[in-house]
Image (cartoon, helix red, strand yellow):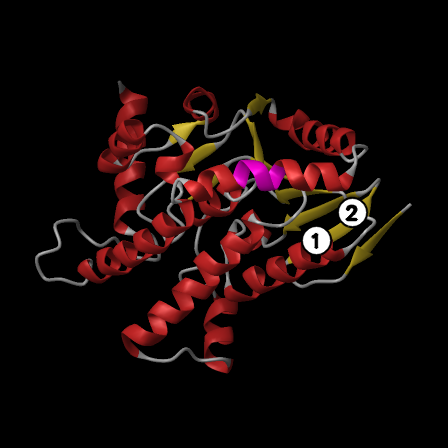
Amino acid sequence: MGYEEEYEDITYEVRNKVAHISMNRLRYRNAQSRRLLEELDDAFARAAKDTGVNVIAFFGQGDHFSAGHDLGSEDEIADRSERPLQKGLRGRYDHSREEFVDKTLRWRNVPKPTIAGVHGYTIFAGWMIASAMDIIYAADDTMLLASNFQYFSVPWDMHPRKAKELLYESRFIDADEAAELGVVNRVFPVADLHDAVVEYAERIAKNDPFQLRMMKLAVNQMQDGQGFVGHITAAHHMHIISSEGERDPDFSLNVPQGQRRPMVERAFENYERQKKT
């Protein structure tokens, strides 16, 4: 037996003790608007409280898991008009902290196993929310891109030297390299990804939920004892400073036309260069 809940930008369905949560903004490649993040937050909280859910499987519908932050879609602009943010640094900080740090930490700490299935573009905020899941399965077409984003898990996702190498250059990593670095657990053909995630989720959903919860807490506590949450908080401050620095007249990169961020533009340039070599 299963059931579905109605949302605007995500889908939510429970089958065989697994909550299936999927981003569903195909027009914008699942770019993360405020409304989408609020709906995800509600869905993860719903799954956490539901005694009929033992595991959460997380997806992005369409050709891409997530193209990152919503930098100004029609929907997002309309929402900001209806619910304007406080102006200035205070407003930017509060919005950034709640939407991209506090929510992501809540999803990391959901007291049930979580598994993400990523594919296509998994850029910036796409990396962020995937990294908050316990396990990541990737399709072989996945292109991941990290930066000094708000929920800065990157040096916990791989060795710090590899993190620096990727961040300094600003380049994509494919699914195979992500697996070598330990960013994702396993790689599958695109057509097999969804079934692989669901099969694994349903298999572990048969285990005792309290034991699963204690296992998750034990592993998360190991990271927390090493300073994970403190690092995320401090790194968010550095993100705010870094993003403010992009407004400086001495900023070294050209700001591209449209919505693409300078470091994303740089990553695409590096990707095109790599294809030619």
Q: Are marks 1 and 2 in contact (CB under 8 Å)?
A: yes
Between 46 and 85, which is closer to the camera in this rendering? 46
Q: Residue at left 61%, top 57%?
A: 40
Mark 1 or 2, nearer chain start: 1
Between 137 and 49, which is closer to the camera in this rendering? 49
Stretch of the chain drawn in magenta: 216-220
* Disc 2: which residue: 53
Mark 1 surroundings: few (<14), some (14-19) or many (≥20) residues within 10 A: many
Please, what is the dominant secondary structure of the magenta stretch? Answer: helix
Image: 253 above or below 99: above
Give the x, y percent position of residue 249.
9, 62
Mark 2 surroundings: few (<14), some (14-19) or many (≥20) residues within 10 A: many
Q: Quadrant of the N terminus?
A: top right
Give the residue type that dot 1 points to: Ala
Image: 102 above or below 86: above
Question: Residue at the left extreme?
Answer: 250
Give the x, y percent position of residue 169.
23, 34
Estimate the spatial distance between the alpha carbons at disc 1 and disc 2, rounded to whole Å: 7 Å
Q: Quadrant of the C terminus?
A: top left
Asked if residue 162 is among those painted magenta in the image, a careful observer would answer no
Q: Residue at left 12%, top 50%?
A: 252
Give the x, y percent position of residue 32.
50, 56
- Looking at the rendered structure, the number of numbered marks drawn on it comes to 2
* Disc 1: which residue: 48
